[in-house]
Amino acid sequence: MNVLTAYVVREILKGSFIAMLLLLTLFNLFTFSDELKSLGRGSYGLKEIFYYLALTSPRVFYELMPSAALLGSLFILGAMGNNRELIAMRAAGLSVLGIIKAVMLAGVLLVTISILVGEFVAPYTERAAQLLKTTAKHEQVMMDTRYGLWLREGKKFINVRKIQEDGHLANIFIYELDDQSHLRQSLVAAKASFLGRQQWKLEQIQQSVVSKEKMVADSQAEQVWTSSIAPDLLKIVVVNPDNLSLYDLALYIDFLKGNQQKSHNFELAFWGRIVNPLVTFVMLLVSAPFVIGVKRGVSVGGRMMIGVIIGMSFNIFDKIVGHMALIYDLNPPLMAVIPSLTVLTLALFAVSRVH
């Protein structure tokens, strides 16, 4: 790597991380504003909100990397163009393709960092963030174990073995203790569905009441159970693509297909993860013709506006294609790669015109 290439790589990395810091701060400010609406619910205070923002930041970092790379490269290359550094580099023998190669080399480092954060940090911190937020708002103790979900509500201990995506529960065990912490009653229900207003309908019930003299067993077809446990408290343990790494997504897709269940949403998320590094390279490639092909003197604000328009247009296009894939059950790999390939084709055409 020669001196000029190393200089471009270093400056692109610097600009991208400054752009990431600004975008992450802006995003967290909006999230902070939204979370203030829940301030005071249960034990959800300012401390919990800041902790929640810190835990969700790795996922946001991963998602914002393409946009940060675009804005950072536009800013840095634009500044180099205005200061006539690009002209000096080309006079020294560094061609347009050489400049683009240096930008792509910086992209390799950005993508490597993004993958490490997105695969090994973000899934775990995102689960922890959702657990923190929901349990604090509902003021309930919750543990997710190999034997299902455990919750405590006063003197009752609830074990839920299975949570379905529609919010219904299966295999529910409820243990109630007396004032001396002795077992007073146990209840086993095959199913539970939320009725609203803190009420659940339990079905296929086996109930046992324990006393010092005897134990009485009973069975019922259904029973209304009043509890402060809300469905959104239970949703956080339902499998979510944001909480899974690429490897875990692949395993879960195989599991769903093996059990003949719908996996389209998870397949789209899986291929979206595969394509994400390509998006960063495409965004870096897009910045080159907009800088090299635009005359000097364009303000920083103008270049930032170009970057914002490109980034927003790509995100909107990507979301539209993703929703179409889910609605019409289209091929996930193809639909995940179409937005990036479309922008890549346009970027390569623009680069060829500049060259």
Image (cartoon, grey):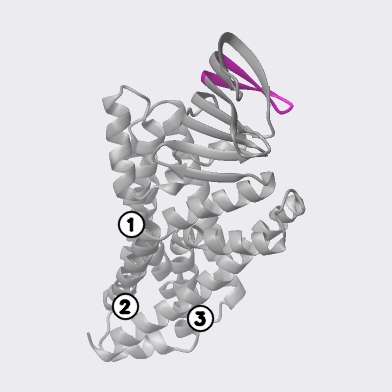
| Nearer the observer, 90 or 230 | 230
Q: Mark 3 points at which residue?
A: 296
Residue 142 location, quadrant: top right
Q: Which mark is residue 278?
A: 1
Residues shaded magenta: 189-203
The x and y percentages for residue 123 are 42, 53
Q: What element carries label 2?
A: helix
Q: Name the residue under label 2.
A: 99
CA separation, marks 1 and 2?
19 Å
Q: Name the kind of residue labelled 2 in the image.
A: Ile
Q: Mark 1 or mark 3: name the one nearer the start of the chain.
A: 1
Q: Mark 1 or mark 2: name the one nearer the start of the chain.
A: 2
The x and y percentages for residue 6 are 30, 85
Q: Is residue 281 above or below residue 218?
A: below
Q: What element carries label 1?
A: helix
Q: Name the kind of residue labelled 3 in the image.
A: Arg
What secondary structure is the magenta-colored segment mainly? strand
The x and y percentages for residue 232 are 61, 37
Q: Mark 2 or mark 3: name the one nearer the start of the chain.
A: 2
